[in-house]
Each structure stands twice: as C-alpha cells, then as structure tokens.
Amino acid sequence: MTTEPAPRLRLMTRAGCHLCEVAAETLDRIAAEAGARVEAVDVDTDPDLQAEYGDRVPVVVLDGREHSYFTVDVPRLRQDLGIG
C-alpha cells in the first residue's frame, strides 16, 4: 500500500500583519486535521517575493499553487485537502 504525500501548505505572510496572524491560526488548525504541515514564508525576506505579493498577504499556497488570499477559504481548503 502506498500513501500519498501530505499536501504542501505555505502561508505567505509578513511581520506585524493581523490578517496573517488570523490566517496562520486557521491554517494550522485545518492542516492538523489533514495531517499536513504549514510552512510560513515572510515575503519581506526576499525582494522577489515582496515584489510579487506586495500588500496582498496573507496568501495560502497549496501544492505550489495560490489557493486563497487575505482570508483562508476554509470550505474550499477542507475540500481540496480531502477533509471536508
């Protein structure tokens, strides 16, 4: 029996961003249900990421593709992770 690799979740964020903090809490909760790990990436640590995302954070990235931004689309994320 083979198992699928856990979906890769990234949260594009920046320090001092209240929406980012809320998104991180939500994403951590959902990821735990799915057995996945969240990698937080501060866009201000990389000029290319800062240019790409600007003020459009937080951004949820699932398996390398942008999933939602500003808020976590919980129903859609749960469905895409196979837990809802």
Image (tube, rainbow, N blue to C red):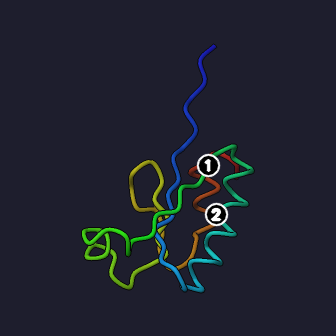
Which one is closest to the eye, mark 2 or mark 1? Answer: 1
Q: Position of residue 12 (x, y in %)?
A: 46, 68
| Residue for point 58% across, 38% down | 6
Rendered view: 27 above or below 32 = below
Q: Quadrant of residue 7?
A: top right
Rendered view: 72 above or below 62 = below
Q: Amino acid at mark 2?
A: Leu
Instruction: Return the disc, 2 or 1, that comes first in the chain's sequence.
Output: 2
Q: Quadrant of residue 21?
A: bottom right
| Residue for point 64% across, 56% down | 78
Q: Which mark is residue 82?
A: none
Label 1: how many residues lie within 10 Å, few (<14), some (14-19) or many (20+)? some
| Residue for point 61% across, 49% down | 37
Q: Position of residue 81 (x, y in %)?
A: 60, 48
Q: Secondary structure at mark 1?
A: loop
Q: Nearer the viewer, residue 42 or 3?
A: 42
Total marks shown come to: 2
In whole angstroms, how far apart are the C-alphas of marks 2 and 1? 9 Å
Q: Which mark is residue 27?
A: 2
Rendered view: 35 above or below 59 = above
Q: Position of residue 64 (x, y in %)?
A: 39, 51
Q: Nearer the viewer, residue 18 or 44?
A: 44
Q: Amino acid at mark 1?
A: Arg
Rendered view: 6 above or below 56 = above
Q: Quadrant of the N terminus?
A: top right
Label 2: how many residues lie within 10 Å, few (<14), some (14-19) or many (20+)? many
Judged from this view, the residue extending furthest toward the top is 1
| Residue for point 49% across, 75% down | 58
The residue to which callout 1 is attached is 37
